[in-house]
Image (cartoon, rainbow, N blue to C red):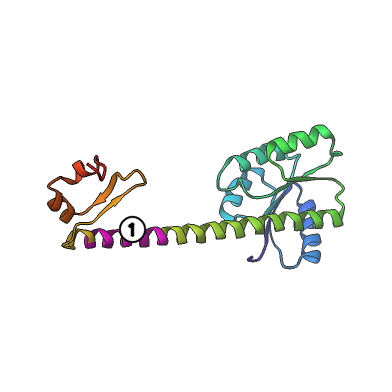
Amino acid sequence: MNEPKILAVDDLEENLFILRELINRRMPQVYIISTTDPYSVFPLASREQPDTILLDVKMPGMSGIDLCKILKADPDTSRIPIILFTAHETTPRFKAEALEAGADDFLSKPIDNAELIAKINAMLRVRNSEEQLKEMNTNLESIVREKTKQLSENERRIRILLETIPYGIYECNLELRFTLVNSAFERLTGYSRDELLELYIWD
């Protein structure tokens, strides 16, 4: 995995400063992007593709819940884990609303430092696993395409061989109905290919 990247969003710069200091001290390998403008979050997330988004719920102009819905609704950002921060206690009603919006986890302010780091690490593991799975799927698709290409080429060669060989060749299924014939077999029987494929061997 490349250097982990986190996008932190809060309308108060002092809160972002505290977050940056904490994460830099406990997770020096993490690169942090931050913004106080909720309207810049979607273009930032779409462009930077952070591994986790730390999103404050209460912001002027657009709430964290609304932002979460926007991010999860777009294919470019839908798979990015989001941790919501709230100044209120995480009541069952809030948890339900956050989960319905697509949040992956949530924290109450004042934030417990150890809990925050643990949740970030959990989200980074999820993101890393998804990236590995995505890479495996890409590799598998590439292998399937290559094997399909090889099979098509082999089939083409076999058909050329069947059509050029001077001996009559045919194939039947378990019911002894013709499923494949070559040109030499057509000439040998006097039937066309289409006619033969409608017949059984005893015909």
In this image, 86 relative to 198: left or right? right
Q: Nearer the viewer, residue 168 or 13?
A: 168
Q: Which of 152 and 47 is in front in this view?
A: 152
Residue 10: x percent and y percent?
A: 74, 47
Q: Mark 1 points at which residue?
A: 152
Q: In this view, does 167 lie to the left or right of 99?
A: left
> Label 1's element?
helix
Q: Give the range drawn in magenta.
A: 146-161
Q: Can residue 63 be seen in this view?
A: no
Q: Is residue 151 magenta?
A: yes
Name the residue: 85% across, 50% down.
111
In magenta segment, residue 160: yes
| Secondary structure character of the magenta stretch overall | helix
Q: Is residue 202 above or below residue 34?
A: above
Residue at the image point whose x is 41% and y is 61% from the top: 147
Closest to the observer, 67 or 197 = 197
Can I make out residue 163 in this image? yes
Q: Residue furthest front?
A: 202
Picture layout, residue 128 above or below residue 175:
below
At horizontal 71% and vertical 40% (from top left) the residue drawn is 64
Residue type at mark 1? Ser
User: Residue 38: x, y in percent?
Assistant: 66, 44
Residue appearing at x 17%, y 62% in the figure: 164
Q: How many labels does the image show?
A: 1
